[in-house]
Image: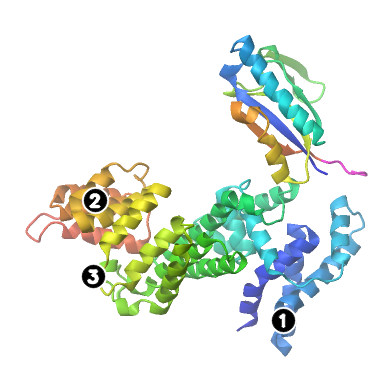
Amino acid sequence: MPTYAALIYTPAEMEGQGTQEDWAAVIAEYNEFGEKAGAAGVVAGGEALQDTATATTIHVKGGKGGELITTDGPFAETNEVLGGFYLLKCADLDEAVQWAAQIPGAWHGRVEVRPIIEWSEGE
Amino acid sequence: MTVDEIVRIEGGRVLATLIRLTGDFGLAEDVLQDAVVVALEQWNRSGPPDNPAAWLTTVARNKALDRLRRESRRSHKETEAFQMLADPPDPPRGDDRLRLIFTCCHPALAPASRVALTLRTIGGLTTTEIARSFLVAEATMGQRISRAKRKIAVARIPYRVPAPHELPDRLPAVLAVVYLIFTTGHHAPEGRLDARVDLAAEAIRLGRLLVELMPDEAECRGLLALMLATHARHLARLDAAGDLVLMADQDRTRWDHSAIAEAAEIVDRVLPRRMVGPFQIQAAIACLHGLADSDATTDWKQIVDLYRRLEQIAPSPVVRVNRAVAEARVFGPEAGLVLLERTDGVEHWHLYWATLAALSRQAGRIDEAARAYRSALDCEMNDSDRRFLQEQLLSLYGPDQPAPAVR
C-alpha cells in the first residue's frame, strides 16, 4: 500500500501566538485525529516540529566537501511554515485526501499530500 | 466510415478498457498505438471487423503481454499489470470510460490538464490538435499532458467512478470540462468564429456519453440539451460574406430544428424532476430562443426569470452579462446598464464591453458606447468578433460625424 506524507503548514503569524488554552485545544484536536487514524491503521509515522525560530539552515557551498555555511532560521521565509507531518498508508490519493482533510492543520492552515518514493529491491 | 474514423471513435472506449486491464496509463496508450498500426494495415486490406473495439482490445492486450514478457527487469507495478492482463480477456465496458472521465477530471489535477487529458484519452484528439485549440505551444501541451499522466500514476489517483455520495462534489468538474470543450469549439478563441466547430461536435459526443453512462443525473442531460440547442444555431451565425450575424437577425431556417426539438424534449422531461442545476436552466433558456419564430416573439420575460434563478444558484460574470441583455429587452437599456455597472472581473472579456457598448448605444449614450467598443477591441478575441465590433464602432457616428479612431 502506498505511503503519503501529509505536510502540515500553518500561518507564520500563528507561531508562538495564542494562550495556553488555545494551544491545549489544538493539541486535543491532534490527539483526536491521532486516535482515529491510528485505530484505522493509517498512521505510519509523523512528528511535530519546534517553531522556525529554532531552525538552522545548512548549505555546503561548492559541492561535496565544500565550505559549510550555517544560517539562523528556516530555509525560506514564507507566510506558511512547516509545522509537522504524518506518514499515511492509504490505498490511493482519494483515501489520503480524505484522511488529510481530518488533520487539524487542514483548517488552521494547509496540508500538502505527497506520495513518498517507494524504493523497490535492486534499485 | 473510414478506418481512421473508426479508430478515432472506438479509441477512447478501447483505451479506457486497456487502462483498467493494465492499471498503467502510459502502457495502455502505447499498446493501443501499436494495435492501431496493425488495424490500419489489415482493415484497409480486408475491411474492418464486425466489432472493431473488441478487435483492438484483443490485439492491444496481446501487445501489452508481449511487452511485459520482453522486459527483463520488472518492477513491482509491471508484475501487477502482467497479472491483470493474464486474466481472461474482458470486453470493453461502458463503465471503463466513465472511470476514465472521472480520473481525467480529478480535482487533484489542474483544470487545464483535466481538459487536455479528457480530449486526449476520451476524445482521441492528438496533442497537436489540443494545443491548437487552446492556443498553447505544442511542447507546452505535451508537457502538461505527460505531467498529468505521471501524477495519476505516482500519486495514485484512483481509476474509479466516485460513490453516489461523492458525485455532488465530483460531477461538476466533469461537466465543466465538457462544457469548456464545447464553448471553445462553439466560439473559437482565434481565427473565424467557427474555426473549431469540430470541438463543439466532440463535446456533444462526450455529453451523449455522459447521459448514457449516468442516466439518472439531471445535470448531465441539462448539459447535453444546452449544447444541442446552442450548437443548433451555429450555421446561421455567419453570413455568406463570413460576417457575424447577431441572433436577432439570424435566418432561423438555417437553425437545426431537430436538434432544438431534441434539446426541448430533454428539458421538458428533466425539469419536473426538481433537481434543477445551472445547466438545465441554461438549456431551458437556449430552448426558448431556439423555439421562438423571431426575436420579437421570443419570451424574454421568462428568459429574465430564468437568468435571475441562474444567478442565484450559480453567479458568475458571464451569467450577469447575459442577464443584463435579457433585462434590457424587457425593462429597457438602463435596466441592463445598471446590472453591468456592478460586474467584477470582466475587464479582459470583450463580450462584456460589447454588451455595455450596445446597451449604451440603445440608451442614446453614443460617446460611452464608443469608449466601451474601444475597450472591447483592446481584448483578445477571434477575427469574426473583432471585425463585427470594429464595424459597430464605425457605425456609431453618422456619415456627417468625424469617424472615431479604430485600433
Part of the protein shown in magenta: A118-123
Question: Which of the labelled discs sits on residue B263, or is there none?
Answer: none
N-terminal label among 1 and 3: 1
Query: Label 2 to label 1, Cα distance in Å?
Result: 55 Å
Residue projecting furthest to the left: B400
* Image quarter of residue B129: bottom right
Which callout, 2 or 1, points at the residue further toward the start of the chain? 1
Label 1, on which residue?
Answer: B51
Depth check: give the residue in front, B348 or B214: B214
Q: Residue at x 60, y 66 (%)?
A: B123
Residue B5 lies in what quarter of the image? bottom right
Residue B90: image x %, image y %? 80, 71
Give the structural element (helix, strand or loop) at label 2: helix
Outermost residue, top direction?
A: A20
Colour scheme in the image?
A: rainbow
Residue at x 46%, y 55% (from the top left corner) = B277
Label 1 environment density (alpha carbons within 10 Å; few <14, some 14–19, many ≥20): few
Report if residue A13 lies within the magenta region. Answer: no
> Which callout, 2 or 3, points to the residue nearer the camera?
3
Name the chain under label 2: B
Q: Which residue is mark 2?
A: B336
Residue at image position (65%, 36%) is: A101
At label 3, counting other C-alpha atoms closer than 10 Å, the crowd grade (few under 14, some 14-19, many 20 or more) is few
Horizontal side of B4 relative to B72 (left or right) equals left
Q: Compare residues A18 and B393 and report the one nearer the observer.
A: A18
N-terminal of the two: label 2 or label 3? 3
Same chain, labels 1 and 3: yes
Q: Which mark is residue B297?
A: 3
The amino acid on which the numbered mark 3 sits, given as a three-letter code, is: Thr
